[in-house]
Image (cartoon, rainbow, N blue to C red):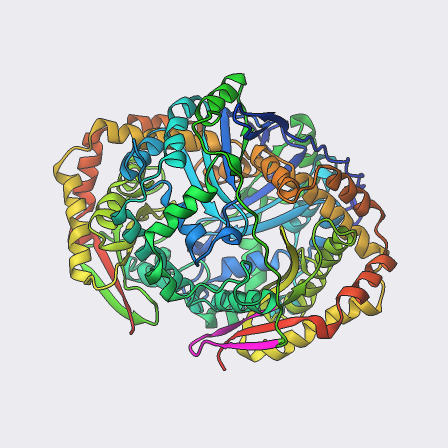
Amino acid sequence: MIQFYRHKLDNGLQVIVYPDYSTPMAAVDVCYHVGAKHEDPNRTGFAHLFEHLMFGGSKHIPDYDLPLQRAGGENNAYTTNDLTNYYLTIPKANLETGFWLESDRMLELDFSEDSLNVQRNVVIEEFKQRNLNQPYGDVWALIRELAYRVHPYNWPTIGKEINHIADASLDDVKSFFYRFYAPDNAVLVLSGNVDIDESLRLAEKWFGQIPNRKVQKPALPVEPVQTAFREKTVERPVPDTALYLAFHMDDRKSREYYICDIISDVLSNGNSSRLYQKLVKEERLFVELDAYISGDHDPGLFLVSGKLAQQVSIEKAQKAVWQELHKLQNQLVPTAELEKVKNKIEANHVYSQMNYLNMAQELATFENIGKAELINEQLDIYRSVTPADLMQTAQKLFHPENCSQLNYLAKS
Amino acid sequence: MINREIAPTIRNIDKPLFIPPEKRTLDNGVPLFLLHAGTQEVCKIDFIFKAGTWQQEVQLQAAMCNAMLQEGSQQYSAAQTAEIMDFHGAYLQLMADQHYGTVSLISLTRHLPRLLPVVEDFLKNPLFPENEFETLVQRRKQRFLLENEKVKVLCQKKFSELLFGDGHPYAQTVKKEDFDSLQLQSLIDFHRHFYHAGNCEILVAGRFDEGLTELINRYFGGSDWKQEPAEPATFQPSNSPTKLLHVSKPDAIQSAIRVGKILVGKEHPDYLPLQILVTLLGGYFSSRLMANIREEKGYTYGIGASFFSLNEAGYLTIATEVDKSYEKATLNEIFHEIELLCQQPVSDDELERVRQYLLGEFIRDLDGPFALAQTFRNVHDFGLNYRFYDDYYQTLLHVSPSQLMRLAKTYFTADSFYTVIAGKN
């Protein structure tokens, strides 16, 4: 049982405190419930660009990083399709500096044309570095485009195209801030060497006066059920041909999510897993082969992706993967094999508690999914999954009408 | 209403606690280091052998010998080893670097009695099966070819070659053909020479009791394990007369840049203040290079300077990736920032910030059992002890602007740097 404490401020800000006195450090994590899926389809990449701007100074603090470093702190942030998370770690004696910095930028940013100009450029270089100048860098963008027709998971967090970022204006920035950055659309998590009462007092002192902004998020378009096989083939200057199969699955809160997670582990978690033993080592059809779930909070994707061994054709590789998927549909996974996967999930649950910052991020993520308390229900749900569940879900998911296939051919 | 213009008072950061591990010796003389730390019933056990590229006779020998250990032993096939580890939620990490071949086992403490005999068998009696070898070589070769598509990898490789010279173990000069010519026998030989009790140390970090040390002694402390220490090899760096090189990658969108030089080793009196100087230049978010080249000019997503330490040399690397059109301007700014460090003393305010930041980092580096294990290796592998950390703390408190400028003038003369650019011509 993971012990933590929760308190809601009058302005709607949820505060969660998770003490771990084995560390001399404290973490301050602020998660805003806004991600790339909330963007305008003609302004993609905005949530992430905005994350950069959050470091350009706030109303009363011209520079975010300098005072934090002065206090011995370190910080970073990440944006996903579902959320934007900001975190810092700091020696416990200077915890209040973290409250001061995070609350001021929740209150109001220093919207400046200069900062926007520079960060636009930085993000465009990031776009090139991560997506254009990396072998296989555009894979996610291609898969999303193929698998989603109307839901905003259609585009990657970094954005659909560079122009969307280049065109962002200061007015766009301002309106995004007031629409989504608010105490009533965020959770504050304190973890590490933190006193509960002191944390709540500081939360009230620094965050308590920030106005509730009555954030309203319109419902997102629901992706219609896929009814026909989709396939796309591209050619790129990469050393290995790669194959990607994406299947639609249910959302993060559904039981199906956990079943899919276990199926993906049976297929490819660890060196003893099916795909690795059979298709990588025994048949040598792939040099790398993985099955995993996208982890999205709205209905997401179950993926199988692999790099083909030299001289192996896409047809042969794809047939071999389907054989393994069909096996899941026709034969129950042996109890011992399921047990192995569950043991691993339980061990990982213990490992994850070794780090206070990791715990802050997990609690914030679960709060975004629904509520942080979900963290203590995870193991029970995983434990309750049966071989019959796996078979049933495999039968539901793995058929061509639910599949988007990307053939990523190596240009010789 | 609170006045948000006034920052909360910054308190001094307490001196971090650094407690060295307890040292024991197994019955056969293998040193065992014990670090009790953490809140969870988890352990990481490192088996550390002096078996890195420094010891190898042909390319890939150290790395592939290390990787093949888990691919089948007398009592367990590769599949069985994997099955047992996965069933217990344990992780094996195998790694060979310049000086060491390491096998790490991360596991819930309660499963160690079941897992240690497996590790024992593959450390002492690996079989190096032919078919597993072929699969692994093929996979590693394809991964190698993939890595060679990245400008930063091409750039880093050429940079290491300029710094240390072809043939030196620190130069990354593996070629595609080396995968084809590698002989299985050379891995068997390498294992026989370097993976044995006389060349091994064991480090345990996490939560455990005396029972574990007895287990380790039972499996690894016997006289059945060969014990002659291996002969140390010596190499001298032969750095190149060429100071600037371009590596061509015609389809590249961005260019990777490396600028740097060999500095001093960890035992040198200038080492600690030089670390601080390099941090100031490019080792944290508000460093000179980041502030200028990312935050002011927007040329790059990131730029950093690092002072790496290997057993026989320390070297500075400034690394970034930029659009081809910013290549020249970026290099100009890098050398401008280096020049500034030689010309003007750093302000008290900036030095105070770096000092505090590094104090915070110091505590982070000592936080948690795995970090503590790394902290130990960062001195122990260099023949140093925890006095090093006392000295570092004192240096952080007392380093002065004039001292840093003196060091910059001594070590950062513009014509002593090597520059490599990988990208479009």
- Where does residue B131 sit, x and y in percent of width and height? 25, 49
Query: Which residue is nearer to you in this view: B151 or A54?
Result: B151
Q: Residue at x 47, y 73 (%)?
A: A163
Identify the image quadrant of residue B147. Answer: bottom left
B104 on left or right of A195:
left
Queried whether the magenta region covers residue B363, the answer comes back as no
**Chief SS of the magenta region:** strand
Identify the image quadrant of residue A241. Answer: bottom left
Query: Which residue is nearer to you in this view: B135 or B394?
Result: B135
Which segment is the magenta one?
A: B244-258
Query: Which residue is nearer to you in this view: A29 or B164?
Result: B164
- Residue A372 at least partly seen: no
Queried whether the magenta region covers residue B249, the answer comes back as yes
Relative to residue A48, is residue B216 depicted above or below?
above
- Where does residue B55 sit, x and y in percent of width and height? 51, 51
Q: How many marks?
A: 0
- Could you tell me which quadrant the N terminus of chain B lies in? top right
Query: Which residue is nearer to you in this view: B372 or B382?
Result: B382
Q: Residue at x 72, y 63 (%)?
A: B288
- Where does residue B130 sit, x and y in percent of width and height? 27, 48
- Residue A342 at least partly seen: yes
Relative to residue B82, is residue A102 depicted above or below?
below
Please identify the residue farthest to the left as the structure is shown: A330
B96 on left or right of B402:
left
B421 on left or right of A249:
right
Q: Residue at x 51, y 58 (%)?
A: A48
Relative to residue B354, is residue B249 depicted above or below?
below
Please identify the residue farthest to the bottom as the structure is shown: B425
- Where does residue B282 sit, x and y in percent of width and height? 68, 60
